Image (cartoon, rainbow, N blue to C red):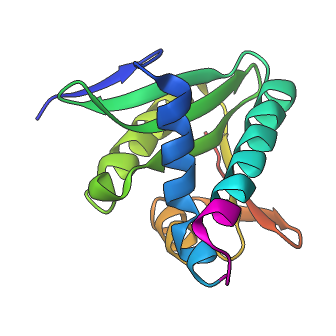
């Protein structure tokens, strides 16, 4: 299986929406909404998130992760002179829990150490699995709020 990071993919917006929706499946499964209601909600949330990324992280490096030329995920990283920020990382369900995201993050940790800058990210408070993974990788909590834990690895 060949892994690659690409600037874009065919039907990119459609793929990114499908990827985003896959990250919300468990949450939406608990709601008593029909498929049309869930889809409308997801589209609204997706558009808002995309716009937020564009305004909050201009110039961020956005890559599509592909396996054998099939889009499988995305990674969004913001490089600044004093730090590197993992803005978003997501994989389709079939590619999760296979060490793929961890490998990408380890590569970024190495790059940050070479650049002598901290590597920062935020993780949703309810995302215990990701939080544990980041802790195992050496990230420490620098602050928390009602929705997120801010974490970093110092260079």
* For residue 124, side relative to residue 12 (left or right): right
Name the residue at 67% across, 84% down: 32
* For residue 101, side relative to residue 151 (left or right): left
Classify 75 as above or below 24.
above
**Residue 20 in view, yes or no:** yes
In this rendered view, identify the residue nearer to me: 42 or 138: 42
Classify 87 as above or below 94.
above
Rendering quarter of residue 24? bottom right
Name the residue at 77% across, 26% down: 82
| Residue 153 in the image, given as x and y percentages of width and height | 61, 50
Asked if the magenta segment contains residue 36, the reply would be yes
Image quarter of the N terminus: top left
Classify 39 as above or below 12.
below
Over which residues does the magenta segment extend?
A: 31-38
* For residue 88, side relative to residue 124 (left or right): left
Image quarter of the C terminus: top right
- Looking at this view, name the residue that lies furthest to the left: 1
Rendering quarter of residue 126? bottom right
Name the residue at 62% across, 84% down: 30
| Residue 124 in the image, given as x and y percentages of width and height | 70, 66
Name the residue at 68% across, 45% down: 120
| Residue 99 in the image, given as x and y percentages of width and height | 29, 54
**Residue 151 in view, yes or no:** no
| Residue 9 in the image, given as x and y percentages of width and height | 41, 19
Q: How many dots with numbers?
A: 0
């Amino acid at each position: 299986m060949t892994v690659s990071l690409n600037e874009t993919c065919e039907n990119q917006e459609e793929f990114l929406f499908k990827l985003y929706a896959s990250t919300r499946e468990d949450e939406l499964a608990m709601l008593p909404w029909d498929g049309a209601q869930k889809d409308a909600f997801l589209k609204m949330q997706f558009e808002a998130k995309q716009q937020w990324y564009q305004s909050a992280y201009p110039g961020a490096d956005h890559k599509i992760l592909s396996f054998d030329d099939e889009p499988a995920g995305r990674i969004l990283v913001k490089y600044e002179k004093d730090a590197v920020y993992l803005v978003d990382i997501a994989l389709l369900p079939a590619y999760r829990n296979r060490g793929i995201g961890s490998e990408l993050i380890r590569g970024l940790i190495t790059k940050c150490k070479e650049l002598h800058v901290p590597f920062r990210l935020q993780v949703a408070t309810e995302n215990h699995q990701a939080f544990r993974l980041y802790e195992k990788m050496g990230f420490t909590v620098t602050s928390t709020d009602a929705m997120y834990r801010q974490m970093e690895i110092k260079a």
